[in-house]
Image (tube, helix red, strand yellow):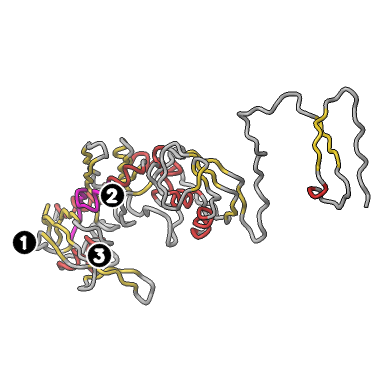
């Protein structure tokens, strides 16, 4: 076996001598060997890390990339979030089962200690994330300048970790189901330095008006708890076809989601559905139509729309629940979309401050009312 010739010992240089026993060596040797290496001119700095820097492993075959060890500081806005959800939001493309595995094996450390998946983070926590392969996701579309300007002008309130946006009709609140860019993705691009931007509730894509967005996790949890307890208020303006019954001020009808053979999802009144309640109040009457204020007490999908249909006065411009001939008559009056608008939201912030924000009726809906008044 060829052995490399040892370097000659240099005069005047201090060496550290370590004796290696034969059973510690890689090769079969019958005698101990003295290994000499130069000593540091100064002792190692105790404050420096003893470990060598971690290097990201090469990407595995089959696509995807691997990140090296990451050390993340938890911002105050994310205090209270579970560690598994924190990791899920940052390791895009990593299966949830893999996240639970690295937590269980102790590869993830918080403040240098092992934690369970249900651990709730605190502001300032130091999270060590091990190297992990992530799938390469397609790039998200970038919000254009026009959309950015529209949303900048649509921000009605932005204080105390809560934002109220006057969402335009036709914009989904988030991507998915064929929609790659929604309101929440656009806001995150507009505020890249904000560590937390999440929807408090949802609006249908075709519905315009006020929607709540949390910029702090504590605000999200607080307002959502108010929503579940019925303390958060949401008021809508809707144009119902026909003459709304004067005595019909509360609709209580259970709703159930259904999927048609075509794949279209609809909601119907069904005795086996979830309990649903909506308050209605007549605002103004027109020939063949009624402007109503609607306040959903429960928060079911398409609740106002289906309850209006249940009363016999489906909403103008509703392609899903209103007959085509009825929609055609409103189209002649200039209506090109669903007439449903989130007019006001009310809630409190964690510090007890009351917030009530109104969203003005869009011009295209106001013009329809003007035409109805002229009849």
Q: Is residue 324 visible?
A: no
Please indicate whether residue 48 sits to the left or right of residue 232 in the image: right
- Alpha carbon of mark 1 to alpha carbon of mark 3: how far? 25 Å
Q: Earlier in the sequence, mark 1 or mark 2?
A: 2
Residue 62 relative to residue 309: left or right: right
Label 1 belongs to which residue?
Answer: 247
Q: Residue 235: image x %, image y %?
A: 20, 50
In this view, the residue in front, 63 or 8, is: 8
Q: Position of residue 90 (x, y in %)?
A: 50, 48
The circle on residue 224 is: 2
Q: Secondary structure at mark 2?
A: helix
Residue 310 rendering spot, x and y as whole percentages: 18, 68
Residue 209 pos. (x, y %) = 28, 48
Q: Quadrant of residue 64?
A: bottom right
Write down the region rendered in magenta.
223-240
At horizontal 12% and vertical 52% (from top left) the residue drawn is 283
Label of residue 296 in the image: none
Q: Nearer the viewer, residue 285 or 54?
A: 54
Picture disc at residue 327: 3
Residue at the limit of the structure toward the left, as seen here? 247
Residue 122 in view in this figure: yes
Q: Residue furthest top?
A: 12
Q: CA distance from mark 2 to mark 3?
A: 35 Å
Disc on the earlier residue, 2 or 3: 2
Q: Is residue 282 left or right of residue 235?
A: left
Q: Mark 1 vs mark 3: give the one in front.
A: 1
Is residue 28 in the magenta section?
no
Most extreme residue toward the bottom, as rendered?
A: 261
């Amino acid at each position: 076996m060829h052995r490399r010739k040892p370097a000659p010992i240099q005069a005047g240089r201090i060496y550290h001598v370590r004796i290696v026993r034969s059973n510690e060596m890689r090769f079969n040797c019958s005698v101990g060997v003295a290994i000499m290496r130069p000593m540091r001119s100064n002792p190692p700095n105790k404050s420096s890390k003893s470990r060598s820097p971690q290097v990201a492993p090469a990407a595995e075959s089959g696509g995807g990339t691997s990140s090296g060890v990451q050390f993340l500081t938890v911002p105050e806005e994310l205090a209270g979030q579970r560690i598994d959800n924190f990791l899920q939001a940052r390791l895009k493309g990593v299966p949830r089962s893999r996240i639970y595995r690295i937590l269980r094996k102790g590869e993830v450390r918080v403040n240098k200690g092992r934690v369970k998946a249900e651990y709730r983070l605190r502001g300032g926590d130091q999270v060590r994330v091990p190297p992990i392969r992530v799938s390469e996701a397609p790039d998200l579309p970038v919000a254009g300048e026009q959309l950015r300007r529209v949303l900048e002008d649509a921000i009605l309130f932005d204080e105390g970790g809560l934002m109220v946006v006057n969402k335009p009709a036709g914009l989904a609140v988030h991507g998915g189901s064929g929609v790659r860019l929604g309101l929440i993705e656009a806001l995150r691009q507009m505020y890249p330095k904000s560590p937390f931007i999440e929807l408090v509730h949802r609006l249908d894509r075709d519905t315009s008006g006020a929607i709540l967005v949390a910029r702090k996790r504590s605000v999200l949890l607080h307002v959502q708890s108010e929503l579940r307890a019925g303390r958060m208020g949401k008021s809508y303006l809707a144009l119902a076809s026909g003459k709304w019954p004067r005595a019909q001020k509360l609709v209580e009808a259970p709703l159930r989601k259904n999927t048609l053979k075509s794949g279209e999802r609809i909601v119907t009144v069904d005795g086996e559905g979830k309990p649903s309640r909506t308050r209605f109040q007549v605002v103004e009457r027109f020939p063949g139509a009624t402007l109503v204020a609607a306040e959903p007490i429960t928060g079911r999908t398409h609740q106002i729309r289906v309850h209006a249909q249940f009363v016999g006065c489906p909403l103008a411009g509703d392609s899903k629940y209103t007959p085509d001939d009825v929609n055609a008559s409103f189209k002649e009056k200039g209506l090109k979309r669903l007439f449903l608008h989130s007019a006001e939201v009310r809630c409190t912030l964690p510090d007890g401050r009351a917030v009530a924000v109104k969203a003005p009726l869009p011009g295209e809906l106001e013009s329809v009312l003007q035409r109805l008044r002229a009849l």
